[in-house]
Amino acid sequence: MTLSIGTIGGKGGIAMLTIIDNHDEEMKLIVHKISSICLSTEFQELCRELEAVYRQCSMDNPTAQAFQDALYSMLTDGEEAGSQHVQMH
């Protein structure tokens, strides 16, 4: 959230308080990142592999669990790659 204070009408004018909420922009970035992951071939292959393993292990709801685990894995891989990139510079 950004907060700025200004005046309208020059000296002695009306004080204005502007608050900019970045929540919508952050949500758009998150949605973009997740949709990019879910549409990737790597993600889809990982889901299939995990689901096959989970079915062999007789896990409850293997499709949903595979999806969640694959998404979590790829989200955290992206964060780790980003933090390593920052640390290298």
Image (cartoon, rainbow, N blue to C red):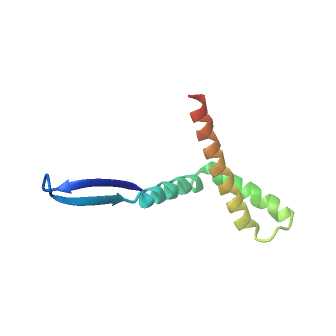
On screen, residue 33 versus residue 56, left or right, reads left
Residue 88: image x %, image y %?
60, 29
**In the image, farthest residue toward the front:** 12
Q: At 76% from the left edge and 57% from the top edge, which residue is drawn?
A: 50
Q: Is residue 70 above or below residue 84?
A: below
Q: Nearer the viewer, residue 21 or 80?
A: 21
Q: Is residue 57 above or below residue 44?
A: below
**In the image, farthest residue toward the top:** 89
Count of labels shown?
Answer: 0
Q: Nearer the viewer, residue 21 or 53?
A: 21
Residue 87: image x %, image y %?
60, 32
On screen, residue 69 versus residue 15, left or right, reads right
Residue 19: image x %, image y %?
34, 59
Q: At 42% from the left edge and 61% from the top edge, which residue is drawn?
A: 24
Q: At 25% from the left edge and 60% from the top edge, which residue is drawn?
A: 16
On screen, residue 81 versus residue 3, left or right, reads right
Quadrant in the picture for residue 82: top right
Q: Is residue 19 above or below residue 83?
A: below
Q: Nearer the viewer, residue 55 or 25?
A: 25
**In the image, farthest residue toward the bottom:** 60
Quadrant (top left, top right, bottom left, bottom right) of the C terminus: top right
Quadrant (top left, top right, bottom left, bottom right) of the N terminus: bottom left
On screen, residue 35 versus residue 43, left or right, reads left
Residue 23: image x %, image y %?
45, 60
Quadrant in the picture for residue 28: bottom left
